[in-house]
Image (spheres, grey):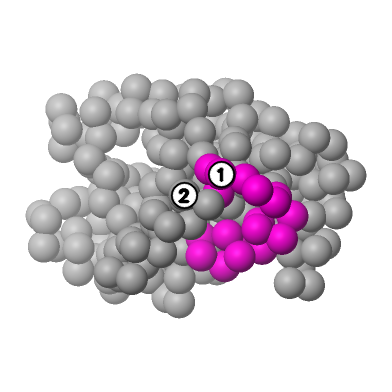
Amino acid sequence: MLDIHLIPVLQDNYVYVLVDQNTGVSAVVDPGEAKPVIDFLEAHNLKPSFILNTHHHWDHTNGNHALVEKYGCQIVAPAGEDRIDGAGQKVAEGYRIEIGDSIATVIETPAHTKTHICFYFEGDKALFCGDTLFSIGCGRLFEGSADDMFQAMQKLKALPDDTRVYCGHEYTEANIQFAKTVLENNDVLKSYEQEVKELRAKSLPSIPSKLEIEKKANPFMVAKTANELGHYRQLKDNF
Ligand SMILES: [Zn+2]
């Protein structure tokens, strides 16, 4: 089993520190900034063995260099991605990554960027999905198509309802405001809005969310076709 620690960095990014309970082996997911992560690692006496990068964007990778310098950890990055410096292991669909006794399966979800991977820890029912799936939203289509994102959503929808969703940004409140304009009378969305409002009022993260909620109240997961998803994405881009 994994201990999962969430570290807010930059404007609204989340970095995750994973610690395998059995072995103490640890990993850092998407370090967009080094200092707050190093502070956390020092305070908890952790020396990460891995950096898991979901995609190449700077707000997910800027801390890589300093962490590698300090801890000599190995960078795990998407196969076919040349824009992540120092990547030691490039992984494709179905690859397994062992963080001590905790095992992640790689799910390829190109759409936000040309290469993008999610890390799914089946034993922990935890999904680290970068900027593919957000709570009640999805990543912008910078390098891929609506078709690509639709396929990514279908892959993630196949995971169990009680999967915890650890995404790259705290965008949930704004995403809910948009979702209400396209999913009318959605009771799951309404009660989730209330729940998120209460958490955010206390400055607590809305993350992790439950995949069950995403399947029912996230317009990009609810979308029945790639065209519908593309339409929602366009509306959201201009919202
Ligand atoms: Zn991104």
Rate crowding at label 1 as few (under 14), some (14 to 19) or many (20 or more) other CA atoms within 10 Å: few
Q: Residue at x 15, y 27 (%)?
A: 22
Residue 116 on the magenta segment: no
Across and down, in percent, residue 182 comes to 74, 55
Is the Cβ of the residue at disc 2 closer than 8 Å to that at disc 1? Answer: yes
Quadrant in which residue 142 is drawn: bottom right
Which residue ends up furthest to the right in the rendered image? 227
Q: Find numbered disc 1 in the image and state the secondary structure of the residue it sits on.
A: helix
> Going 33% across and 71% down the picture, which residue do you hit?
201
* Corner quadrant of residue 224: top right
Q: Quadrant of the C terminus?
A: bottom right
Q: Residue furthest bottom?
A: 11
Tell me the magenta residue range. 172-189
Q: Is residue 72 left or right of residue 14?
A: left
Chief secondary structure of the magenta portion: helix
Q: Is residue 187 magenta?
A: yes
- Pointer 1 residue: 187
Image disc number at residue 64: none
Instruction: Estimate the spatial distance between the alpha carbons at disc 2 and disc 1, rounded to whole Å.
Output: 6 Å
- Amino acid type at image mark 1: Asp
- Under mark 2, the amino acid is Ser
**Quadrant of the rendering where the N terminus is positioned:** top left
**In the displayed structure image, the side of residue 238 where residue 221 appears, left or right:** left
The residue labelled by disc 2 is 191
From this view, report whether residue 204 is shown above or below residue 221: below
Looking at the image, how many numbered discs can be counted on the residues? Answer: 2
Q: Residue at x 89, y 44 (%)?
A: 227
| Depth check, front residue: 44 or 232 | 232
Q: Residue 187: where, in percent of width, then height? A: 56, 44
